Image (cartoon, rainbow, N blue to C red):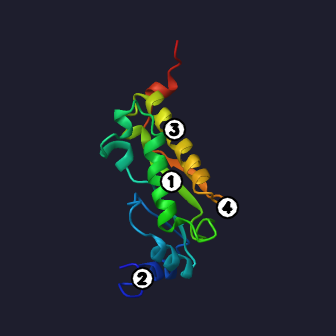
């Protein structure tokens, strides 16, 4: 749907004034090259988001490993790198500027009331991403890594611990 053989969604988005596409989740087993090339040809940046699958859905997800997400995210990120996020020279695809490592961790790992758990999850996930980049021998400029948070209020975050 996003390319010229479909509805041309990406060119329509560009015509409407968009400069970037934010994606929620992906399957690291799928090749993303065509989408990234089409976005680039339309002058759009891509901000892919990692799937919730390694965090909360797969066997051996982060919640079953005491919120240590290192290996789950390293494996998922390596899959993305090998399936279109990297070019043949091992540099990032030029359409990718930032990657959302986890979307709203405070609402799912396990909840907003346990900030130490979701902080451990996101820090170990970022560590896994950095290790994946090293293992894949990424060259050139690295992409920005980010975490998106909700507008939910964390009472435990504002209460000093004793």
Extreme residue in the bottom direction: 5
Mark 3 or mark 2, which is nearer to you? 3
Q: Earlier in the sequence, mark 3 or mark 2?
A: 2
**How far is disc 2 from disc 4 in space, using C-alphas?**
29 Å
The quarter of the image holding the N terminus is bottom left
The residue at 33%/43% (across/down) is 56
Give the foreground label among 2 and 4: 4
Q: Is residue 142 above or below residue 19?
A: above
- Of callouts 3 and 4, the N-terminal one: 3
| Residue 151 in view | no
Q: Nearer the viewer, mark 3 or mark 1?
A: 3
At mark 3, the secondary structure is: helix
Which mark, by number, is residue 124?
3
Task: Tell me, yes or no, whether the two marked residues, 2 and 4, touch with CB atoms within 8 Å.
Answer: no
Q: Tell me, for residue 100, which label it has, or none.
A: 1
Instruction: Provide residue 103's location: percent of width, then percent of height.
Output: 44, 49
Of labels 2 and 4, earlier in sequence is 2
Considering depth in this image, is 90 or 62 the residue closer to the camera? 90
Element under disc 2:
loop
Q: Which mark is residue 139?
A: 4
Q: Position of residue 134 (x, y in %)?
A: 61, 51
- The answer to whether residue 44 is left or right of residue 52 is right
Task: Look at the numbered discs 3 and 2 and tell me whether their residues touch, using CB distance below 8 Å.
Answer: no
């Amino acid at each position: 749907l996003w390319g010229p053989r479909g509805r041309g969604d990406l060119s329509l988005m560009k015509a409407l004034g968009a400069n970037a596409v934010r994606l929620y989740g992906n399957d690291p087993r799928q090749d993303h090259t065509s989408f990234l090339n089409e976005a680039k040809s339309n002058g759009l940046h891509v901000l892919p988001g990692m799937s919730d699958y390694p965090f909360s859905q797969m066997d051996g997800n982060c919640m079953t490993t005491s919120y240590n997400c290192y290996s789950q995210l390293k494996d998922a990120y390596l899959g993305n790198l090998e399936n279109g996020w990297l070019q043949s020279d091992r540099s990032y695809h030029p359409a990718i500027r930032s990657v959302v490592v986890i979307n709203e961790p405070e609402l799912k790992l396990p909840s907003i009331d346990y900030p130490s758990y979701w902080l451990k999850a996101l820090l170990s996930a970022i560590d896994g991403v950095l290790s994946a980049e090293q293992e894949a021998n990424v060259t050139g400029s690295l992409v920005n890594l980010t975490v998106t948070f909700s507008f939910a209020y964390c009472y435990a975050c504002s209460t000093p611990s004793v």
